[in-house]
Every structure is written in C-alpha cells, then in structure tokens.
C-alpha cells in the first residue's frame, strides 16, 4: 500500500543532501507508486524561496513537483503544514549540521510538533561517547525514542540486508558460524577518493569516527549476532546490542595519506587518520578467541567493501599433506557489484590429483534482473512506514562509541602514499579481496 497523507519535511532543504539524494529518492518513490499524491514535501531552510523557485532547483517531473512547497525557518512551520491539509504523520528529515540537531528538535517541539512527528537524523551522531549520550539525552527531553530514526546508510545497502537472510534462511552456514570453525573475520572498506570538499568536517572526525565506529560496527553486528526471536526491529536491535556488549578492541593503528594536510579545510599539522587498522574480539560463547580485523580508509587503490570469513585450515591429511591447500572462505561483497563468493578447492581436470582454488559466485544484479534501490529510497520509505529495522537505536550508538573511547585520536600516525594501503602493522594474513574480482564477473 502506498504511503498517503504524510507531510515530509526536510530541514536544510537548500543544502546538498536534499538536492543530491533526498528529493531524487522521493521522486523515485512517487514514480514507483510507493508514495501517492496525498502527501506533501515541505522544504525548510534559512534561504527564501518561492515554491516555484524551490521546485526549479530539482530535475523532477511536474506531477511530483506539485507536491513540493517551501517554508523559511521553523517558526510557523506547523501552521504552514496544516494549511496544506490534514496529515496522519509528519516525518522530519534533519539534513542539518549535527551541532544544531538538538536545538532544532527543541524548536520543533516548541512549535507544537508532537506524537505525530518522527525525526530522521543523519550521521555523524555525536563525536564520542559523552557527546552521543548528551545528544540522546537532549533529544529524549522532547521526543520519545520511538520517534527518532538514526540513519546509518550502510544498513540500507541491499547486500547488508541480505546478511541476516543468508545466515538465518539457510541451514548450511549456522553450524560453522563460530570460533571453533572460523579463524578470523576480516572487514575491509576501501575508497579511492580522498576527503574531497569535506576536509573541514573530516579533519575533526577521522576514519574511525567516520566509518569504523558506525558503519563497520553495524556490519560486524549483523554478521555475528545470534538469531533474533522475531524479525521485529526491537528484537534485531537487542541481538546487535548483545554483540556490542561483548566486543573488546584489542588494537588500533592509524595512518594518514601523504598530501592530506594540504587538503582544503585540513589543519597543516593534522594528525587525523585517513586509514585505520583495527583488531578486536567478541567475547561471547560463539566467538571467543577469534580475532576480527578491520581495514578502512581513503585514497586507496580501489573502491570496495567486503567481509571475509576465513575458515580454519584443513587437517594435514589426504590432499593437504603439505598444508598448502587454502582453507575455505566466504566473502560478502557489500559493494560494488553486490554478491557472495565462496572460495572452494577443486580438482583440476586430468588424471593427477592436482587442486585449484575456485569460486562460486552469487551476483544480485544478474540473479534478480532489477535495479537495486538507492539507500535513501529505502530509508525514507521505511521511516514513512515506521519500520525501524534499518535505523540505529540510542543504545547501539552509545555502546559503539563507548567501545572506541580509549582509541579515538590516540597513538602515533604513520603516513602512506595515495593509491595503495599502508604496510600493515597487524600480524595478519589479510585476504586479498581484489583477487576475487567482482561477484558479477
Ligand atoms: C560516509 C562517510 O558515511 O560514508 C564518507 O562520511 C564515506 O566519508 C561514505 O565516503 C562511504 O559510503 P559508501 O556508501 O560510498 O561506501
């Protein structure tokens, strides 16, 4: 059923996020019939626009454009919405600098936005444990947790959503999903881009805050959590929290690409990391003793996010008497070319018992010949429907910050040349994800 009679408010509507992501995502949802013409979309910001001038900022068809209105500021916004009709719910997307989240939430409450209101909040959510807690407290003063939708756009990626399906809708994997069978889990998130025009923000954050504390912890939780009691958002969150509780970070190494200090907005003596290596443990019955390794950063040789499950070696018997047969791996290609790859040993044709490393690949795109929805389409639609599964709870975000409390901005920084990862400081046999190519080859 299409979403109807909702007012969708974008605070910060004259900004980049609204133009690049939010309005196009809403336009696609409208085109697909997921939201109908009984909804309104109200942009709000500091700039003054007429409705026509606001609509003209976007490349959108006329029937969708007629849902768009503009109102400057928050004072009087509730009345303005009411002048457009009666709406069952108001969903407010805060496309704003994090420093004003709590202030705007309070202003909205003062304006009379009450139980019918949901707030969607972009990352970064806090700067560390204390600030995340403070922000949660301030938001909770005016809105209930059930009204708050914290975005982690990685959760909306199709391949990420498939992690739970893969694990809990197949019987093949669960028996091996533990530290008795698995040697390590390796998460890798490489980007080719540097900080681009976000130097000022990035320099106060760094890779650990920007990527590891949020996106990669979420991936890890989904990969390692116990089966939830049901598929309700609260049950899934409860299992993620159980994993987070038991995580202990063992070591963190920080690196910076050469030339970073010359980027616009970056301090000339900055010690902010643009690449990080992390080793951690999950101290529960299933995962005890098995290390998790993370490598994440910018200005690298390729764009790719993968999770590798490295199984334990074969016994030195039969085909593996010399111990050289590669143990199995399961590789989740989160992006690009989403899919799953199994690394298996196989006999090469001919009479000799010679083995080869082979792969079995599952590729989304070719398997289900449909376009994969853009993250913001999924997130906006879920928020409109009140489904919180893909959003992060207050407790998750706080706990995740808490785990990194002793590691933010700590330790020396090493440098690396743009275009390749730095030499590792961890004693790890890193999976060469590039070797597997795309899941869609
Ligand atoms: C964002 C970070 O959350 O994720 C960016 O702030 C990063 O620095 C981006 O580039 C990566 O997202 P994706 O979807 O391109 O992997």
Image: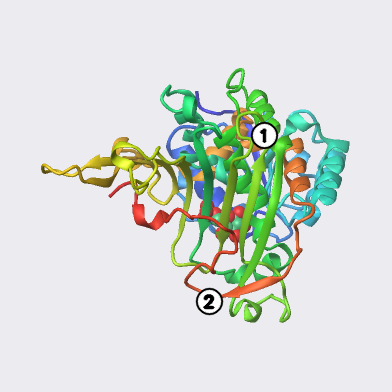
Which color scheme is applied?
Answer: rainbow
Q: Position of residue 218 (x, y in %)?
A: 61, 41
Picture quadrant of residue 314: top left
Q: How many other residues sit within 10 Å of disc 1, few (<14), some (14-19) or many (≥20)?
A: many
Q: Is residue 71 left or right of residue 184?
A: right
At x 69%, y 27%, the residue is 238
Viewer-closest of 356 and 239: 356
Q: Position of residue 181 (x, y in %)?
A: 49, 33
Could you say whether the residue bearing mark 2 is in a helix, strand or loop?
loop
Residue 354 seen in the current view? yes
- Nearer to us in this view, 89 or 219: 219
Residue lying farthest left?
350
Q: Residues within 10 Å of mark 2 (few under 14, many from 20)?
A: few
Residue 42's x, y, as percent?
Answer: 65, 45
Query: Splitting the image into four quadrants, where does ligand 1 fall?
Result: bottom right
Q: Which mark is residue 243?
A: 1
Q: Which residue is at 77% across, 53% downward?
A: 73
Q: Secondary structure at mark 1?
A: helix
Q: Position of residue 43 (x, y in %)?
A: 65, 49
Quick one: label 2 or label 1, which is nearer the N terminus?
Answer: 1
User: Residue 418 has which mark?
Assistant: none
Can residue 111 be seen here? The reply is no
- The residue drawn where x is 46% and y is 43% is 310
Question: In the rendered structure, are the residues bearing label 2 and label 1 in contact, judged by CB atoms less than 8 Å apart?
Answer: no
Above-or-below relation of 233 to 29: above
The picture quadrant where one finds residue 422 is bottom right
Q: Mark 2 and mark 1: span between their CA atoms?
A: 35 Å
Q: Which residue is mark 2?
A: 417
Kindly identify the residue that appears in the image at 54 percent across and 32 percent down: 180
């Amino acid at each position: 059923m299409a979403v109807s009679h909702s007012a969708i408010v974008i605070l910060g509507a004259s900004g980049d996020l609204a133009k690049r992501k939010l309005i196009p995502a809403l336009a696609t949802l409208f085109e697909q019939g997921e939201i109908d013409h009984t909804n309104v979309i109200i942009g709000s910001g500091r700039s003054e626009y007429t409705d026509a001038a606001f609509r003209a900022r976007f490349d959108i068809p006329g029937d969708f454009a007629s849902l768009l209105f503009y109102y400057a500021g928050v004072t009087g916004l509730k009345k303005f919405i009411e002048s457009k009709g009666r709406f069952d719910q108001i969903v407010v997307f805060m496309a704003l600098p994090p420093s004003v989240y709590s202030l705007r939430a309070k202003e909205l409450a003062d304006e009379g936005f009450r139980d019918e209101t949901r707030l969607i909040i972009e990352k970064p959510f806090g700067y560390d444990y204390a600030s995340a807690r403070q922000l949660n407290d301030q938001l909770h003063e005016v809105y209930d947790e059930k009204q708050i939708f914290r975005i982690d756009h990685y959760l909306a990626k199709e391949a990420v959503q498939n992690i739970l399906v893969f694990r809990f809708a197949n019987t093949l994997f669960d028996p091996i999903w533990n530290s008795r069978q698995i040697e390590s889990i390796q998460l890798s998130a490489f980007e080719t881009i540097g900080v681009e025009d976000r130097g000022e923000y990035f320099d106060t954050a760094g890779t650990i805050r920007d990527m590891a504390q949020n996106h990669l912890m979420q991936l890890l939780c989904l990969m390692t959590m116990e089966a939830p009691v049901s598929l309700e958002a609260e049950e899934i969150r409860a299992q993620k929290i159980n994993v987070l509780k038991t995580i202990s970070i063992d070591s963190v190494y920080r690196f910076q690409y050469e030339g970073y200090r010359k980027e616009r907005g970056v301090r000339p003596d900055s010690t902010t990391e643009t690449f990080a290596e992390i080793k951690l443990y999950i101290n529960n019955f299933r995962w005890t003793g098995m290390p998790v390794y993370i490598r994440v950063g910018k200005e690298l040789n390729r764009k790719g996010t993968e999770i590798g499950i490295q199984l334990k070696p074969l016994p030195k018997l039969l085909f593996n008497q010399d111990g050289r047969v590669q143990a199995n791996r399961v590789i989740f290609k989160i992006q690009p070319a989403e899919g799953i790859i199994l690394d298996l040993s196989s006999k090469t044709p001919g009479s000799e018992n010679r083995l080869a490393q082979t792969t079995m690949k599952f590729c989304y795109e070719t398997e289900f010949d449909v376009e994969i929805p853009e993250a913001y389409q999924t997130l906006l639609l879920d928020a409109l429907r009140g489904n919180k599964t893909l959003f992060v709870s207050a407790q998750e975000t706080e706990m995740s910050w808490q785990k990194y409390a002793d590691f933010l901005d700590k330790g020396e920084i090493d440098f690396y040349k743009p275009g390749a990862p730095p030499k590792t400081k961890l004693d790890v046999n890193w999976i060469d994800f590039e070797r597997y190519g795309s899941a869609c080859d």
